[in-house]
Amino acid sequence: MLGWAQGIYIEDERKALLEIKASLLEVSNVFNVENLLPTWVDHGKYCDWERIKCSTTSGFVTDLSMGNMFSIEINVLDIVYVFEKSHVLIWPLNASLFLNFKELRRLDLSFNYIGNTFVSSGLERLSELKRLENLNLGYNVIETNIFPSLSELTSLKILNLTHVNRYSMKPTHVFVFYSLQTITLSGSGSRETFKLSRLKSLNLVDNHFNKSLITALTTFTSLKTLNLGSNSLSGPFPSQELSELTNLEMLDMSFNRLNVTPSIQDCKSLMRLERLESVSLALNYFNNSIISCLSFLPSLNILDLRYSFRFGKVPNLPYLEVLVLSENNLNGRLPMEALASFHHLKLLDLSFNNFVGSIPSTIKSLSSLQVVLFAYNSLNGSLYNDGFCDLKNLHELDLSHNMFDGNLPICFSALSSLKRFDISSNQFTGIIPPSLIVNLTSLEYVDFSFNKFEGSFLFSLFSNHKKLQFFRFESGSEKIEVETEEPIGWIPMFQLKYLVLSNCIRKRPNGSVVPSFLLHQHKLRVLDLSHNSLEGQVPNWLFKNNKNLGILKLKDNSFRSVIHMRYKSNINTLDMSGNHITGTIPEKLQSFIPRIRYLDFSSNELNGVIPTSMFDLTDLEMLDLSNNKLSGEVPKGLFTNLSRAAIIKLSNNALYGHVLSGNLSFMGNLDTLKLDNNCFMGNIGINTSGNSMGLKVLDISENHFTGRIPSWMSNMCSNSHYSDGCELVARNNRLDGPFPFGEASFEFLDISQNSFSGPIPSGINLKYTKHLHLGSNRFTGLEPDAFQNLTNVLTLDISQNYLSGRIPEFLGELSKLRILLLGKNNFIGSIPEKLCQLNNVSLIDLSSNFLTGLIPRCLNNITGPKQLAFIQKNIGSYGVDSFWIDIISQYHIRDTFYPPEFFQFETRDEIQFTTKNNHLSYKGNILDYMSGLDLSSNKLTGEIPEELGMLTHILALNLSHNKLSGPIPVSFSYLSQIESLDLSSNNLSGKVPSELIQLTKLAVFDVSYNNLSGRLPERKAQFGTFGKESYEGNPLLCGTPLENNCTTTPQVSKPSTKKDNEKWYDIEKASFYGSSCSTWIVFMLGFVAIFYINPYWRRKWLEYIEECMYTCYYFLYDFVRYLYKLFHE
């Protein structure tokens, strides 16, 4: 290899560089990264090659910047993946190759899947490179003890071993780096201390050091920067030890367990730290007394006390320039009086607290302020008199997630230095002043989302904003539209990296279009145009123009035609759900989107089969193809080849085949698998991999699976870090046999509408269960005592089984219960009064049993739920790529400020309930608004309690087909929300109360087949809509719509005067016996015919026979037991 040094090519350097490139080949093939280091060729001046810097005098290589060779998206969410994949893909880099670079000063090999081979291949020999000062091996997977080798590199001044897979080392090793000035060991797991006599910067973040480390560091007197965040430090603040570090300028001890303030005498020792300017004690456990201790620091001007929770007031340190008090549970009004003397304050962070009221105008006295962060409080009022317009030095203003209202002050346009402006999630109204946008040309970050703005906002107002990188506008109002096309042909001077225009682009008569200014954008990393009714072809040119595009969301638009992939992209998140895309899923997706991690084509019109090329998307973590028209069989290996996949959703298609038959082998990362509403069939096979223990959500409902449930399904989530949240939905299949309840405690278990039989096991684990659906099966026996453990249950459905015995009293102790369905079983006895304790219940169905006795009067205690319980929760989220890391470092914000995108995949609760004479299914959020009581088809007696009229929230009440007597309670007129009232087939008497015409929402009213009498209520309001079928079977009722006229005198039949001289006993016997037999035969045939054509009466007859059998059985059982006991006594 030729190297250019003083006019002479140095062959050794060129050869070493080409060998390094060749060693990348194996790993780059796995990542589908083509043509790595294309400028590294066997000719020309290698000092002109990428990632290389040479000395301007000698021409030798001095800097090799080879970090992140495979373009890993560097963010926190990817770190785990880097380590996972690194164990399989190790770059076989030979350390001795670098010995050829005699003048090398800096070597960066971070994020490169380097393993132990690099250490064993001669890392210690790099000591021959006498000028090597900076070595970065961060984010690799070196699991061996690296320090014996590094201790030889005596020229090092900067060493970065961040997250080197938490390598293990023996605590007996102590290494001396005589000239080392900076060392970073973040996340390395080191428990050692090092004698670093010249060390100026020490970063030991995210390790396990305890307080003994502090004593060991007292000899590091040259230290200027010390970062001990996220360790295991506890006890008192080490003021005495720290006072030895007299050159210290920055100290970070955040995220530890320090909780004791030293004595005043010890605190005074901090006066020796004359250069210490910055201190972070975030997330420790000090109280206000620590402020007195810190006040002895003579040069302190930066103080971070985030997440402390124990500071009740602003610290009295008026010389501070930076004060961070976010997430401290501070409340009341903003402490502007306490801050009035902070004349040097440049940054004030009071976000994530509980402050209320408006912002005092006295804030203008803090004229040095550059950054104001008041997000996530409960501040309100307008901004017209708040003094912000006088803060001429303001660079960042974050007022998001408060309750500010009114118009935006036009005087904000005078804040010419403003870079970040975030007012999202408030209640601002009116138009956005154009002058506000035009004059703030320094803006880089803008968020106007979720307010109540009106009118049309011209996006072209930003056309001259050269620095704009981040813009987000998600509309929470239909009164505001963003106009992107006016004036026609406008060209922006900015290059955005992050753009969200969701549910806000102006709707056009001929269909909305993708904003044309995007044709001029080439640096986009995140683009969200969802919920805008955009039409036309999917804009493939976005991939061509923006090589670094990582996230593209086009959800809920009107894009049509087929998916055409034309350009290769490094995108990791693509959401095209909720459009009108037709055709088939493209083959060879891997050729166009090889790094895709989240792929969502759901709710379109895709047809055809799932291509086997899906297997090649090796980085795929979430795949959603639900709600399409896909057919055919699922390709074998879909659940095994996608090794990273955590979520696979194929719901609501026309897929078929034996997808779960045979020997199964699930992927280790698989968390959620949804196969519901397809045509899958066959028995469910045995899992041979054992990885189903980590499966948390499995939905196979509405298919044609047969046979028995295998044991692995009842042991899901056993290996999961979070045992709650486990869901199994197998509703409406053809499964049978006993259900194998295992170790899993399902939060959601629905095996209804199958043929499971036998008793419900008493050992069932119900610790985390919130939704339990066992209805429409063949379970027998009593309710198990294990149901007492349903302390978190919201839905309990065991209806339509063959359960018997009495309804258990303990059901009344399930305080969180919202829905109780026990109908169509064989329960006997009375309704337990303890059910009246279910204050939060909204639906109760005890119909079609053999319940007797009175209706409990205390049911009026059921007041209904006070809060929502069936809202759809979010599971799984994706982060924003490395751009968000850039934003965090550029602005004074944390990743919590980014509103993450979530996948709403929670299984929605579904129940069946009879209302308005219809047996319907209710699903999802509607259950929060359903309320009903069904006691029909039992043997309840007595009068209807007046107290039921107090159930003012109820929507449906069914007491039909019982033996109730007495009048209809007038108190029913208080049921203001009721829509269905069924009192038919009882023995009720008296009038239909005229007060019931006040029930303006009543849609179904049925009092047929009772003994009611008198005039019907006036045909007003809803009663004008009820026909005679609502009243039939009550011969003494009169009035419209019945034919009986209340004003007509009923005719009285005259007694017959004809004398009957015939004797009653003069009967011909042959005729008598013949007619009797004929009558008996006709009666029996009619009896059989009725049972044949009417399944309801047939069921009633069989239930009667069964009840007689039970009665005889228990009578004989009790009698024999009595005789047995009497005999033994």
Image (tube, rainbow, N blue to C red):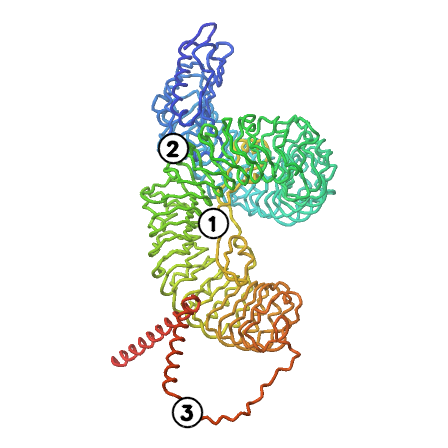
Image depth: mark 3 or mark 1 in front: 3
* Image quadrant in which the C terminus is located: bottom left
Residue sticking out furthest to the top: 7
Label 2: state its secondary structure: loop
The correct choice, above or below, for 980 with respect to 695 in the image is below
Residue 907 circle label:
1
Name which quarter of the figure residue 456 lies in: top right
Q: Position of residue 511 (x, y in %)?
A: 63, 36
Using a 10 Å C-alpha cutoff, classify the residue at mark 2 as few (fewer than 14 neighbours), some (14 to 19) or many (20 or more): some
Give the labeled residue for mark 3.
1065
**Which is nearer the N-term, disc 2 or disc 3?**
2
Answer left or right for 393 relative to 146.
Answer: right
Amino acid type of the residue that numbered disc 1 sits on in the rendered structure: Thr
Q: Residue at x 71, y 31 (%)?
A: 438
Q: Nearer the viewer, residue 431 or 962?
A: 962
**Which is nearer the N-term, disc 3 or disc 1?**
1
Using a 10 Å C-alpha cutoff, classify the residue at mark 1 as few (fewer than 14 neighbours), some (14 to 19) or many (20 or more): some
Answer left or right for 1074 relative to 500.
Answer: left
Image depth: mark 1 or mark 2 in front: 1
Give the labeled residue for mark 2.
167
Residue 223 circle label:
none
* Image quadrant in which the N terminus is located: top left
Q: CA distance from mark 3 to mark 1?
A: 76 Å
Q: Nearer the viewer, residue 588 or 299?
A: 588
**Which is nearer the N-term, disc 1 or disc 2?**
2
Amino acid type of the residue that numbered disc 3 sits on in the rendered structure: Tyr
Name which quarter of the figure residue 274 lies in: top right
